[in-house]
Amino acid sequence: MTFSIESAERLPADFYCRKTADVARALIGKTIVHRTAGTITGGIVVETEAYLHRNDPASHSARGRTASNESMFLRPGTLYVYPIHAKYCLNAVTEEAGTGAAVLIRAIEPTIGIETMCGRRGQSDLRRLTTGPAMLCQALSIDRSDDGRCLVGDSDLGIFLNTADDHRRRIVATKRIGISKAQHRNLRFVDMNSRFLSRPVPKR
DNA sequence: ACTACGATTACCT
DNA sequence: GGTAATCGTAGTG
C-alpha cells in the first residue's frame, strides 16, 4: 500500500475540538500513520475509547493535572502517550486546551508498512500485530518520547481521512475495556465488522 | 524508601 | 477461561 503524508487529507484541529465521545466515534475508519527514518507505518482505526474530564473516574485527568498527564491538557490534536504495565498507549487530545479529555486508540487494521511493523512486534500474524493499544504503539514505534507531539502539524505523524469507505462502516458503542471505575458507560467505539478488534463486540 | 496498582500482553490449561 | 511479567506513577511514612 502506498501512502503519502504530504498528499493525504489530514484531520484538522477542528476535528478534535468537539465532545470526546463524538471524536472517538468519528475516528473510526480514519488512518493513523507515523514516519520514522523515511519509513511509514500505519493503519485504519477500528476501535477507540473516550476518556472525559468530568464525572469520569476512569480518566487519567480525573485527579487533576500532573507532570505525567500534562499533555492531556494541551491543545486538541495533541498526542498523549502514557506508560502502563511497562508498555505504552496513545491518545488524541480533544475538546479544548485545559479540559483534560482524550480518545484512546485501542486497535487499528494494519495497512501501511506491514513488514516493518511485523519486525518491530516480532510477529507475523496480522491478527496479533496491532489489535491492542500497546501493540499498536509498538508497531508504530510510538513511546513516551513522542508524548506531546502534534497530530495536526507534525510532518511525520498524523491522522488522515480515508478516501473511500468511511460511510460503510457499522459503528457500535460498548463498555470500555480494562478499567475498574465507571465501567457501565458505553464509551468504547468499534467497527463491528472489523477483524482487528482488541476484543470482540459483546453479545448484547 | 516502600508499597500498591494499572486505559496490557503473552502464554498457559 | 486464568495468571504472571513488568515498571512508571502516586500515595504513604
Image (cartoon, coloured by chain):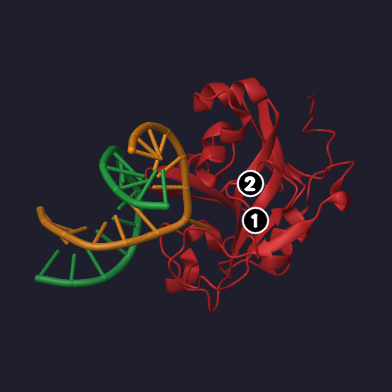
Chain colours: A red, B orange, C green
State which quarter of the image contains the N terminus of chain A: top right
The spot of residue A19 in percent (x, y) is 70, 70
Q: Chain of mark 2?
A: A
x, y (%) of residue A85? 37, 47
| Residue A76 at least partly seen | no
The correct choice, above or below, for A98 with respect to A24 in the image is below
Residue at 77% of width from left, 33% of height from top?
A5
x and y, in percent, of residue A57 in the image: 47, 73
Determine which residue is flagged by label 2. A197
In the structure shown, which secondary structural element does the residue marked by tag 2 occupy?
A: loop
Query: What is the three-letter code of the residue carrying label 1?
Result: Val
Residue that appears at 73% across and 66% down: A22
Q: Total number of numbered labels?
A: 2
Q: Nearer the viewer, residue C2 or A22?
A: C2
Mark 1 = which residue?
A: A201
CA separation in Å, label 1 and label 2 = 8 Å
Q: Are marks 1 and 2 on the same chain?
A: yes
Residue at the location (76% across, 58% down)? A171
> What is the chain letter for disc 1?
A
Answer with left or right where residue A22 lies relative to residue A48. Answer: right
A85 on left or right of A190: left
In the rendered structure, are the residues bearing label 1 and label 2 in contact, judged by CB atoms less than 8 Å apart?
yes
Density class for disc 2 (Cα within 10 Å; few <14, some 14-19, many ≥20) is many
Specify the amino acid type for callout 2: Leu
Q: Residue at x 69, y 64 (%)?
A: A173
Inspect this view and state whether residue A190 appears. Answer: yes
Graded by Cα atoms within 10 Å as few (under 14), some (14 to 19) or many (20 or more), the crowding at tag 1 reads: some
